Amino acid sequence: MEHISVKFYRQACIYKIIRQKKYIGLSELVERVQENLLMNGYEIGISQRSIQRDIQEMNATWVSICYDKGHKGYYMLQDEMAETIWEHIFEQITLFSALQSAGAVSDYILLEQRKITGVELLPVMLKALKSNLKIEFDYCKFTEKQSRHCVVEPYFLKEFSGRWYLLAKAANEEFIKTWALERVSNLSLTSVRFKRPLQLAPDKMYEHTFGIYADESLPVEEVVLSFTPKAGRYVLTRPLHCSQVVLADNDREIKIKLNIRLTNDFLMELLSQTDKMTVVSPVHLQQRLQDIYKRAIERMNKF
């Protein structure tokens, strides 16, 4: 297996280290990058000058790293969306590096059988997003047998549960829609530019949403859930939503509160945990889950 480019891996290390330690000095940064390189099979020396050149190149292309003279160290400008994206990328780089240094790994590692979908379309999508170019493609819904041709203004990309989605607006429509990349074919860039609406804010669109479909017609509701102590530990270490607040944490239960829209994605998440979770409130959410169970039982009883 070929190594990831040492330069690419070195820059990924610089990014990760500065994210972990604000105002890190150049000497310590060089030392820690070198440790990472050696640990992952890159037997190559680096100098302070090579790290400085890397930082200059990174600043010119994909991230903002600054130097604070008072603290005598490097730090990174805060951009939560960019940080999330680069964290995902660094995780993949780290995994690939570990695999390549281990040699044959099929006897030791079990990978998820369901592949992430839509990844192959990301380069074209990103080019369109950065250049404000309309794109065209054929799209086939799950509920339809025939594809239809679409020309859209692409605004954002979002990943959820192993699938990539495009948030875009068709030329003849007013509202932004969500398009699953796995159902897109014959994708191409057009030469037509569009003006991106300045008021678009994806963090606000998904502020109260779990999953991919941000239905703003749904009200934001206070949801209280009670978990068994063991199940609750998973929810504490990986919160269901950014609004999650812990109300109780004891030997009997772990109780949390969320402020969230009751989208279908959120309901499906709750259904996956109902053997170890109780909906405390609202009452109408309890009823909705009960109705889903009743219909499922009726379907199974027919066989």
Image (cartoon, rainbow, N blue to C red):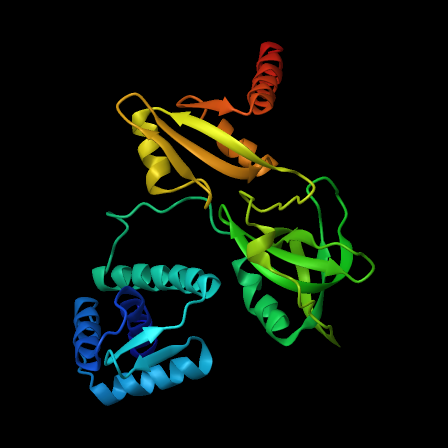
Name the residue: 62% across, 69% down. Answer: 129
Percent position of residue 185, x then y: 67, 58
The quadrant where residue 6 appears: bottom left
Say which of 274 and 248 sits in front: 248
Q: In which quarter of the image is the C terminus?
A: top right
The quadrant where residue 79 appears: bottom left
Percent position of residue 26, x then y: 22, 81
Determine whether, in the image, residue 278 is placed left or right of residue 167.
left
For residue 75, above or below residue 221: below
Percent position of residue 98, x then y: 26, 60
Name the residue: 26% across, 74% down. Answer: 23
Name the residue: 24% across, 47% down. Answer: 108
For residue 264, above or below residue 15: above
For residue 6, above or below residue 253: below
Residue 2 seen in the current view: no
Determine whether, in the image, residue 276 is placed left or right of residue 221.
left
